[in-house]
Amino acid sequence: MKKLITLVAALTLSASAFAEVVVDHPYARAVPPGQPNSAAFMSLKNNSNEEIALVSASTSVAEVAELHTHTHADGVMKMRRIPQITLQANSEVELKPGGLHIMLIGLKRDLAKDEMIDLTLNFSDGSSEKLDIQVMDVMAGMGNMKMQHDHDMNKNIQPQ
Ligand SMILES: [Cu+2]
């Protein structure tokens, strides 16, 4: 009987923790030793008929995880913290380099290519999703935009 109760509890827990949002291809940017910040990217698919929003994130490898977007002004890419990333009903939002991303601020250790890190996503309906995401080399193809990104970060945002 005790075993059955444990099983039911486990099922209930996984059901309530399951978000209506499907996460596709999550990854984090590998950074060279000493870099204070990185970012995580993924595609978020809302398969429900209700609007839902990603409201926060956390990871054990950084002090803070913030939701960020990029704005393009006078030829310079700048990042801005946003309170949430809204997912309209039955739609998909892409978090990608140069666009929406989850900023990992105050890295507690280096993020080397191919290792896995944990990332928890918290949604507006109270659900959350814990992911194991791969660290990948995102430098290639990002060129100057990427460099500007890091430059701005180092200047403007101090780890708390
Ligand atoms: Cu950012």
Image: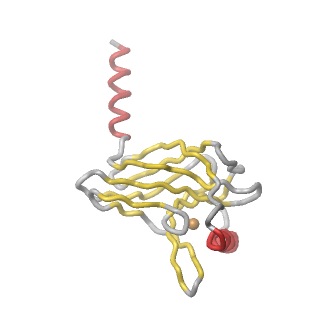
Classify 140 as above or below 133: below
Applied colour scheme: secondary structure
- Residue found farthest to the right: 34
Quadrant location of ligand 1?
bottom right
Q: How many marks?
A: 0
Q: What is the quadrant of residue 46 in the picture?
A: bottom left
Q: Position of residue 24 (x, y in %)?
A: 44, 49
Q: Position of residue 119 (x, y in %)?
A: 53, 47
Tell me what residue is drawn at x 60 percent, y 57 percent. Answer: 104
Residue sticking out furthest to the top: 1
Q: Is residue 79 above or below residue 137?
A: below
Instruction: Compare residues 131 and 7 and report the one nearer the observer.
Output: 131
Left or right? Give the position of 87 relative to 35: left
Image quarter of the N terminus: top left
Q: In this view, which residue lies farthest toward the bottom?
A: 74
Which quadrant of the structure image shows residue 37?
Answer: bottom right
Given residues 104 and 73, the one toward you in this image is 73
Outermost residue toward the left in this view: 49
Which residue is located at x 51 percent, y 62 percent?
Answer: 96
Q: Position of residue 139 (x, y in %)?
A: 65, 61
Please indicate whether residue 108 sits to the left or right of residue 58 in the image.
right
The residue sitting at 33% across, 36% down in the picture is 15
Front-most of 142 and 107? 142
The C terminus appears in which quarter of the rendering? bottom right
